[in-house]
Image: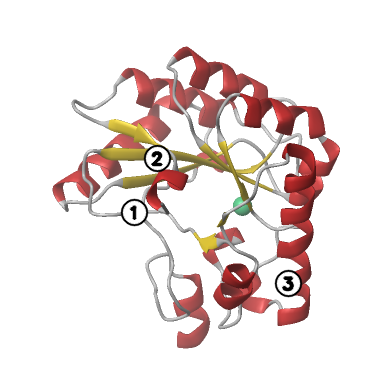
């Protein structure tokens, strides 16, 4: 991987234009979920979020949204913020401008067609970007959103270590004076039937362990 590709894959990199990670508001925490909607795991996650009365931000894969329209409407009705995570989950560091635009525009149209609400947030799969990714997203009215707390929840079999790793990252961000933009996965871009019990279980543990004075927000609250 050359330096150029590396810059495009590094979540904190601003080389390819403005991106949103997390503002300097150490008391705030945004839970975000990628690679859904998933007919098995997303409803379980919605239950946990409802139990704690927390609104989250979901970055949806367009083709899965098209296959699970009622679920997308349910997420919207529950007050969650829905963002764009492309139609097929390609690495945009290796995707040309024409296909990038198609991936983003088709997904935005699909979600907006289902919910009737504008989609203002976009998260690139794997954090991968090219010089044209940001301009295309912003041209479609979306901010590019990255993250600053992630662990390999997609490989985990137990919730406890996932929650522990993320709580540690929340603490680290707070000490650095930053909000936390935490990402977990309620689906899988390659294998929709993949196990996500550890990811959903970790959410309950993080919310139960809730650090003192933390304020749960959506990423939407950070873009004004
Ligand atoms: Zn993803």
Q: Which residue is mark 2?
A: 30
Q: Nearer the viewer, residue 19 or 40?
A: 19
In whole angstroms, how far apart are the C-alphas of marks 1 and 3? 25 Å
Instruction: Reply above or below: 148 against 39.
Output: below
Secondary structure state at the residue bearing disc 3: helix
Mark 3 and mark 2 residues within 8 Å of each other at the beta carbon: no
State the mark number for residue 101. 3
| Crowding near the residue tagged with mark 1, few <14, some 14–19, many ≥20 C-alpha atoms within 10 Å | many
Residue drawn at the location 50% of the way across and 76% of the way down: 8
State the mark number for residue 22. 1
In whole angstroms, how far apart are the C-alphas of marks 2 and 1? 9 Å
- Residue 97 visible somewhere in the drawing: yes
Mark 1 and mark 3 residues within 8 Å of each other at the beta carbon: no
Question: Residue 102 in the image: x percent, y percent?
Answer: 78, 68
Q: Nearer the viewer, residue 59 or 206?
A: 59
Instruction: Reply above or below: 223 against 174.
Output: below
In whole angstroms, how far apart are the C-alphas of marks 3 and 2? 27 Å
Q: Is residue 132 left or right of residue 163?
A: right
Question: Residue 217 in the image: x percent, y percent?
Answer: 38, 36
| Crowding near the residue tagged with mark 3, few <14, some 14–19, many ≥20 C-alpha atoms within 10 Å | many
Secondary structure state at the residue bearing disc 1: loop
């Amino acid at each position: 991987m050359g330096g150029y590709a590396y810059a495009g894959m590094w979540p904190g990199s601003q080389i390819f234009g403005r991106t949103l990670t997390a503002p300097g508001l150490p008391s705030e925490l945004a839970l975000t979920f990628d690679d859904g909607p998933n007919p098995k795991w997303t409803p379980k996650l919605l239950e946990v979020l409802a139990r704690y009365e927390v609104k989250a931000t979901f970055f949806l894969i367009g083709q899965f949204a098209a296959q699970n329209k009622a679920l997308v409407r349910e997420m919207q009705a529950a007050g969650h913020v829905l963002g764009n995570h492309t139609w097929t989950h390609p690495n945009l560091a290796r995707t040309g401008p024409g296909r990038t635009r198609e991936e983003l525009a088709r997904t935005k149209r699909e979600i907006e067609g289902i919910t009737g609400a504008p989609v203002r947030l976009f998260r690139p799969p794997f954090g991968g970007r090219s010089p044209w990714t940001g301009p295309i997203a912003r041209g479609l009215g979306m901010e590019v959103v990255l993250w600053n707390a992630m662990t390999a929840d997609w490989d985990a079999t137990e919730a406890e270590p996932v929650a522990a790793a993320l709580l540690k990252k929340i603490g680290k961000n707070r000490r650095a004076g930053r909000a936390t933009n935490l990402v977990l996965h309620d689906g899988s871009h390659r294998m929709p039937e993949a196990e996500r019990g550890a990811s959903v279980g970790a959410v309950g543990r993080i919310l139960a362990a809730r650090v003192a004075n933390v304020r749960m927000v959506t990423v939407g609250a950070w873009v004004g």
